[in-house]
Every structure is written in structure tokens, then in C-alpha cells.
Amino acid sequence: MNTLSYKTKSQRNEDVQRNWYVIDAEGEVVGRLATKIAHVLRGKHKPQYTPHIDTGDCVIVINAEKIRFTGNKLKGKEYLRYTGYPGGLRRRTAKEMFDKKPTAVLENAVRGMLPKNKLGRKMFTKLFVYEGTEHKHQAQKPQEFKF
């Protein structure tokens, strides 16, 4: 019997080291940027990634009003929500959504790429999206995230 054990070490909540990253969204395509952000929020960029533990880092996105869509998605893409009442389906195009609240476009895209459970909701709380270049997280000393 071999005495060496090659077991994979599973990450624990107490051992998670969180970093803060700043991402400049100027000129980026919504979906491509959202996949990269979701990847960091889940923690898949780390060697210690564990599926059932929130190992992800915090992400600050600036210049959210300068993201772009490809093709005719600005006119054709629709965001649907349901009020809960009969006939309560509400539609809003990407342009309307972008004009009303540009941060919501990126937040919706990232939320759709995270797990649909308690862990996914916890991961989403580590995303901070801002219009413009100013954010209120200077004390955390965020680093620029390189893709």
C-alpha cells in the first residue's frame, strides 16, 4: 500500500483571499465583457477554485455608459420582466434600458452568467458598476484587471 496521498485540497470559506479589480468598460462589447467579469466573480481564474465555495474576487466596473452592442442589438434586443399580474409582461429595448440606466445592462448580463442559487446571489454582491470614471472603493486599493 502506498503511503503517499495525492488528494486535491478543497478550499474553505475561511481561507479565501479576495482581491479587488477595476475594469474599464469603455469601448467593450457587453457580452464579452460580462463573461470575463462572471469568470472573476466565480473565482475560476484562481487555482484554488472550488465550485461550492465563493472563491471569487470583487470587481469594480467604471465607464459603464460607454459599453457597446454589436450589430442591431441596440434596437432589436429586448429585456423582459413580469409584474406578477395577468398581462403584466413588460418589454424594454436595449436602447431604452441603456438610456434609462446604463449600469443595469451590464448587471443583467453578468447576473445571467452566474449560478441561479444562493451562491450566485452572493457572488453578484461583489460586483460594483459605475457610470463615469469615479468609484468609492479607493480604500480597497483595487488593481487593474488584465484580460
Image: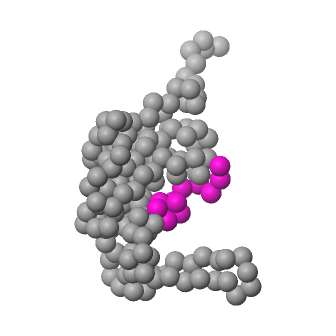
Asked whether 78 or 113 is in front, the reply is 78
Q: Write down the region rendered in magenta.
A: 107-118
Q: Is residue 15 left or right of residue 100?
A: right
What is the x, y in percent for residue 118?
A: 65, 49
Q: Residue at x 46, y 83 (%)?
A: 93
Q: Quadrant of residue 65?
A: bottom left
Q: Residue 63 location in percent, x, y?
A: 29, 60
Q: Number of marks in the image?
A: 0
Q: Is residue 44 visible?
A: no
Dividing the picture into quadrants, the one containing residue 81 is: bottom right
Q: Is residue 138 above or below residue 86?
A: above
* Point 61% across, 41% down: residue: 52
Residue 2 pos. (x, y %): 60, 14
Q: 71 or 92, which is in the foreground? A: 92
Report x, y in % for residue 117.
65, 53
Q: Residue at x 65, y 13 (%)?
A: 1
**Residue 122 position (above or below residue 102):** above
The relative height of residue 61 versus residue 52 in the rendered view (above or below) is below
The residue nearer to you, when weighing 44 against 92, is 92
78 in magenta: no
- The way the protein has been coloured in the rendering is one colour
Residue 134 makes an appearance in the image: yes
Direction from residue 134 to residue 79 in the image, left or right: right
Residue 114 among magenta residues: yes
Q: Residue furthest right?
A: 86
